[in-house]
Amino acid sequence: MSRVRQLKTASPAKLFLRRSRRAFFAVGLFSCFINLLMLTGSFFMLQVYDRVLPSRSASTLVALGVLVTLLYIFQGLLEATRSRIFVRLARSFDLDLSRTIVEVLFETSRASRLNGDGLQPLRDLDQVRSFLSSAGPAALFDLPWMPLYLGLCFAFHVWIGAAALIGAIILILLTAASGMLTSRPTTATVIAGSARIGFAGMGVRHAETLHALGMTGRVIARWQERNLTYLNAHQEAADILAGFGAAGRAFRMLLQSAILGLGAFLVIHQEATAGVIIASSILTARALAPVELTIAHWKGLLAARQGWLSLQAMLANHDTAAKAPVLLPAPKSTLSLEGVAVRPSGDLKVVVADVSFSLHAGQGLGIIGPSGSGKSSLARAIVGVWPAFRGSVRLDGASIDQWNIDELGRHIGYVPQSVDLLAGTIAENIARFRDGVEDWMVIDAAKAADVHEMIVRLPSGYNTVIGEGGVGLSAGQRQRIGLARALFGNPWLVVLDEPNSNLDAEGEQALTKAILEVRQRKGVVVVIAHRPSALVAVDHILALSEGVVQAFGPKEAVLKRITRPASIGPAGLKVVDAGVAP
């Protein structure tokens, strides 16, 4: 069963707790000893005041000092070990979920638009991991030991116990109130923070266009509005937490002083010894310390809880089925579409309706049509980027959803409308970042795209490092390297979405040659075209208009049928209404 399937059948919380139950058992055991050792200070002061001072025994004081030192050292070691366990639990949580979250994120991103910059699930994961590695969980493990300290306070005197109990109840109520009042602004902070980061990222990606069109100032103003929303929500949550935190600390200090005063009153009336004054004060402080520490980490706890719930919702709503482990043979015969309809995820409008055709090995198809006719959407459906809303795309009779994603990718070459290269070397991008790739395979793909000479003229050749998105290369260079990546490994099906939009005459000749070579080796090529030069090497045409097939068949017959002179331009050029500019 795949990891995604496992996470669908059980929540991340249950899986994490099940895998980490031994570690949590160890934390609970260590917390038991730590809280018992926390009594050291109280009993030491009790012995000093009630035994050492009345007897004036230096040897007893030294013995107690040595014992207390050893106990404090042991306590320190246990606390350090517990903290290290929490850090490793946080790391384990990240390792358990990070890959799955990124897989789901990529899967969701390719099928629909994400809110903000789309990276909120990773921030949610960071929030949970940060909280697990902080002192917050330790405070939660110490809370169950409050009755022990309160019980000892009652053992000293019922009034001391009652005062400590009332103080604990008040602090618990403060904690609950802070949680209720900060829940809404904390959620608003997360949402607003994601929106501001996403909007800023959009501005950075399109900074050149914004500058050229004089839009920079207005976009920055829009970002400031989102930033102000985030700051207001953050300030509201921070003010509430700061107020309750300060109130909790002040009340605990007041309660500690009140316990000292109450102890002194009891000593005056000879109902308690002098040691009880200090010991009860230390015990009360220790009993209430976990509550105060919980208040201090309440913001982190709320953020972690919000992140945890978001991750659970994201994984629960993910509906990708686990792929069968059976490896299908490489396609080599037929690409067929059977009544394919395409609808972007989250959109009710069908952008491509009931497309059916078949292509056999060695054939090439050009898809033409006006802008917005659904050409790119159909291309995404053919390569499996967008699942067909209705109908099926089949390779040699098998629908593409039967294929393992990574294995299917070996048989498909794809150049999207906007070529996005990844940060790395040119060779890594062409090789699709596969490990163990022979150099000749990369060079063969580059030569098939006729980009080898261009690459070797670069300062570091194939080892030239490019930035994310292909920073450092021209649009034409990115498109030709994207074509080389699509041709890497000689895939059987090659889908090219406007592959000549940024190419010069030399690049278009290379594109035509590459398409012909794919057909000659009995592959299938699908080309989305706005310029007729991209159609030179195909033998079939499919014309789309508003998502509906207008014509399909041999190139010459279809073009003759769907094109007509609409007007004569000033240069005497025919204007064609089939979505292919002359």
Image (cartoon, grey):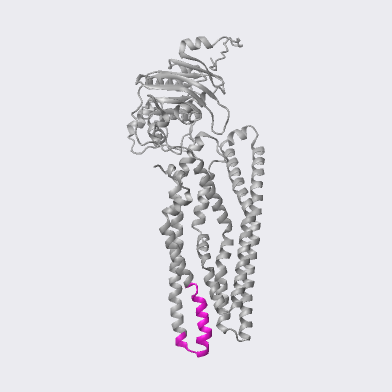
Q: At 34% from the left edge and 36% from the top edge, which residue is drawn?
A: 437
Q: Residue 315, how many percent across, how many down? A: 49, 43
In the image, residue 540 sits, relative to residue 103, either above or below, namely: above
User: From where the camera sits, is residue 357 visible?
Assistant: yes
Decide which of 304, 19 is in the foreground and name it. Answer: 19
Q: Is residue 24 left or right of residue 238?
A: left
Q: At 61% from the left edge and 65% from the top edge, which residue is drawn?
A: 171
**Residues drawn in magenta:** 37-60
Q: At 59% from the left edge and 61% from the top edge, which residue is drawn?
A: 295
Q: Is residue 321 magenta?
A: no
User: From where the camera sits, is residue 449 visible?
Assistant: no
In the image, residue 456 sits, relative to residue 200, either above or below, namely: above
Decide which of 45, 343 is in the foreground and name it. Answer: 343
Q: At 54% from the left edge and 11% from the top edge, which residue is drawn?
A: 563
Quarter location, residue 226:
top right
Q: Residue 95, how many percent across, how many down? A: 43, 49
Q: Residue 398, how many percent across, how many down? A: 39, 27
- What residue occupies the far bottom of the structure in this picture? 55
In the image, residue 511 sits, relative to residue 198, either above or below, namely: above
Decide which of 78, 325 is in the foreground and name it. Answer: 325
Image quadrant containing the N terminus: top left
Please give the count of numbered marks on the rendered protein.
0
Quarter location, residue 284:
bottom right
Q: Is residue 146 left or right of residue 329?
A: right
Decide which of 220, 291 is in the foreground and name it. Answer: 291
Q: Residue 125, how many percent across, how many down? A: 50, 49
- Please tell me whether the stretch drawn in magenta is mainly helix, strand or loop: helix
